[in-house]
Image: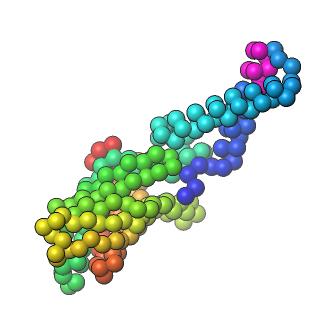
Amino acid sequence: MKNVNSKSLLWIVLCIALAVFVVNHFYYDKQITLSYLFNYLTSSVSLITILAIVFNRYLWKISIFHKWFVLVPNLNGKWEGNISSNWKNLEQPQQVKTFLSIKQSLSYISCVMTTEEMKSRSITTDFKMDTDNQKLELSYIYMSEPELNFREKSPIHYGAIIFDIIKSGNDIIQLKGNYWTDRKSNGTIILDKISK
């Protein structure tokens, strides 16, 4: 998953390294020696690492970084909607109320979907961003664990979901997509964002 613009990242790292060099050189007024270069490299790497950790966890969500640097959308929050599933009846898909909780940093995303009968957790996730075709998708593979009293008719199973990420202006308002499972069921899921 390509989360940041690599050219922008390179420029940012170079600017931070140059700023550390200038501050070290003029503030401490040191001559350039092997020891000085080692200290410079150590302080540059330390500062870049600290900034990367803070940015990955918190700062990436700020809208000013999006489009030119951060490439993935911020889906953090709670989503509510319905699953139209053919699990119990192939001819007459049933509507099931569902909730999706998404926790996301710049480098990681976790999806937990719940209904009255089950809870599913993402195992692996990915974004597909195709700007030429104006397509933005979230896909993930999950494991579904039905509640104990439903396990006889609905065993633990695996599945996959592909969501279209639907925007209105700059705001993401809906996730709409299809799912498939290893128990030969499938359906459509439509979710609206209800909270951050």
Residue 177 is inside the magenta segment: no
Name the residue furthest left. 149
Whether residue 179 is visible to the viewer of this picture, yes or no, is: no
Name the residue furthest bottom. 91
Q: Position of residue 183 (x, y in %)?
A: 29, 79
- Left or right: 28 as drawn, with respect to 161: right
Q: Quadrant of the C terminus?
A: top left
Asked if residue 39 is positioned above or below residue 99 in the image, the reply reads above
Q: Position of residue 12 (x, y in %)?
A: 67, 38
Q: Position of residue 66 (x, y in %)?
A: 54, 44
Name the residue furthest front. 35
Residue placed most toward the observer, 23 or 73:
23
Q: Quadrant of residue 48?
A: top right
Asked if residue 57 is positioned above or below residue 3 in the image, the reply reads above
- Left or right: 141 as drawn, with respect to 151: right
Q: Residue at x 81, y 29 (%)?
A: 37
Residue placed most toward the observer, 116 or 8:
116
* Overall secondary structure of the magenta section: helix
- Please, which colouring scheme is shown? rainbow
The number of discs equals 0
Q: Residue at x 64, y 32 (%)?
A: 46
Q: Quadrant of the N terminus?
A: bottom right
Residue placed most toward the observer, 67 or 6:
6
- Left or right: 90 as drawn, with respect to 109: left
Q: Quadrant of residue 138?
A: bottom left
Q: Which residues are magenta?
A: 21-28
- Left or right: 104 as drawn, with respect to 133: left
Q: Position of residue 21 (x, y in %)?
A: 76, 26
